[in-house]
Amino acid sequence: MFDWFFNLFRRRISRRISDQSVEGGLLMMQGRFEEAITSYDRAIKINPRDVSAWSGKALVLMELDRFGEVIACDDRVLEIDPRYAEVWSQKGVALGGLGRWQEALRCFEEAHRLEFEPAAEGIEICKKELGQSS
């Protein structure tokens, strides 16, 4: 009997999440990073399992060199979707930014295993930083 209501409710919630994520992306492109983070946080509050909001927030934090927070966002995405190869790679970049090269290498290797080819460059950089040959 109330199926139409629940479907309408789901569509409205979905649109609100999408609107916040789109707004976050637009604010980031304008260099309005703190506002973008706030927008992504609103999307996350609506749906804590929204990987696009978590990964978008991580991208903004990466621009601000807030690597610890990037890693926290990436960990949340990977809890939800452990096959999100780009996020494994992004986490590798953040770990590298903190000088945690061994952990970064593991992330890049996982991204590469998941067939994210750009991760190969991250693997090479990590090996160089660790003094390993290819």
Image (cartoon, rainbow, N blue to C red):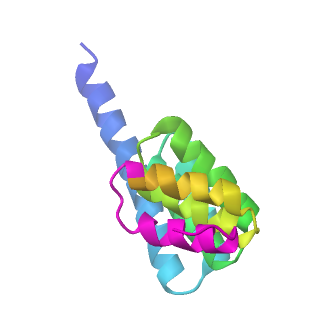
Of residues 77 and 94, the one nearer the viewer is: 94
Name the outermost residue toward the front.
Answer: 133
Residue drawn at 43 percent across, 66 percent down: 120
Q: Residue 87 at x, y = what percent?
A: 49, 56
Q: Is residue 126 located in the magenta-colored stretch of the structure?
A: yes
Q: Residue 20 at x, y = what percent?
A: 47, 60
Relative vertical location of residue 114 with respect to residue 80 in this rendering, above or below: below
Relative vertical location of residue 88 with respect to residue 96 in this rendering, above or below: above
Relative vertical location of residue 50 with respect to residue 117 in this rendering, above or below: above
Residue drawn at 69 percent across, 78 percent down: 64
Name the outermost residue toward the bottom.
Answer: 30
Residue drawn at 71 percent across, 76 percent down: 65
Q: Residue 90 at x, y = what percent?
A: 54, 63
Q: Is residue 48 visible to the viewer in this orientation of the structure?
A: no
Residue drawn at 55 percent across, 37 percent down: 79
Q: Is residue 20 located in the magenta-colored stretch of the structure?
A: no
Query: Which region shows up in magenta?
Result: 113-134
Q: Residue 1 at x, y = what percent?
A: 24, 12
In this rendering, the count of numbered labels is 0
Of residues 16 and 54, the one nearer the viewer is: 54
Question: Residue 98 lies in what quarter of the image?
Answer: bottom right
Question: Residue 116 lies in what quarter of the image?
Answer: bottom left
Q: Is residue 43 visible to the viewer in this orientation of the structure?
A: yes
Would you say 106 lies left or right of 65 here? left
